[in-house]
């Protein structure tokens, strides 16, 4: 896996409340919304960063970013967080090594 962690984002117009619902196919727990396109992209970046940080804290795997589909934008995570995500997680006290 490279240090270039950037994930395709899906922005779905919210027909009821306006704005956009934001999802990531590779990181399904990263779901958010924004009142307009700019706000949705800011929220997308924050949701993705938090979801990756949560995976790191739990020792979960970090998925490879898939290729962007038609109409999808790419959201990168900051390089520092990408490096942290790719470093081996030391075992937690009391948890045996696998």
Image: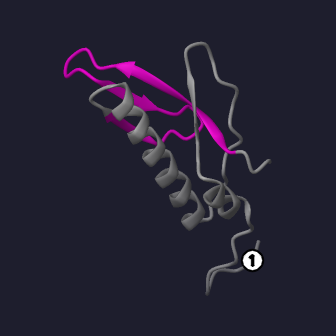
Tell me residue 56's x, y (percent): 59, 62
The residue sitting at 64% across, 61% down in the picture is 80
Residue 71 sits above or below residue 94 on the image: above
Would you say residue 31 sits in the magenta stretch? Answer: yes
Tell me residue 49's x, y (percent): 51, 51
Q: Nearer the viewer, residue 74 or 26?
A: 74
Left or right position of 63 against 28: right
Magenta highlight range: 5-33
- Which corner quadrant holds the C terminus? bottom right
Q: Nearer the viewer, residue 44 or 56?
A: 44
Tell me residue 15's x, y (percent): 25, 14
Tell which residue pokes out farthest to the left in this image. Answer: 17
Q: Nearer the viewer, residue 83 or 98?
A: 83
At numbered mark 1, what does the secondary structure look like: helix, strand or loop?
loop
Number of marks: 1
The residue sitting at 68% across, 37% down in the picture is 65
The residue sitting at 44% across, 39% down in the picture is 44
Tell me residue 71's x, y (percent): 55, 14
Task: From the image, tell me which residue sits under label 1.
Answer: 97
Left or right position of 11 against 18: right
Would you say residue 62 sits in the magenta stretch? Answer: no
Q: Nearer the viewer, residue 62 or 78?
A: 78
Tell which residue pokes out farthest to the front in this image. Answer: 38
């Amino acid at each position: 896996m490279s240090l270039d962690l950037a994930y395709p984002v899906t922005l779905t117009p919210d027909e009821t409340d306006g704005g956009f619902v934001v999802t990531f196919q590779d990181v399904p727990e990263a779901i958010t919304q924004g009142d307009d396109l700019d706000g949705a992209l800011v929220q997308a970046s924050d949701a993705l960063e938090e979801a990756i940080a949560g995976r790191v804290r739990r020792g979960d795997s970090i998925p490879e970013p898939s290729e962007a589909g038609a109409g999808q934008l790419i959201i990168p995570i900051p390089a520092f967080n990408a490096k942290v995500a790719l470093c081996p997680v030391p075992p937690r006290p009391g948890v045996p090594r696998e």
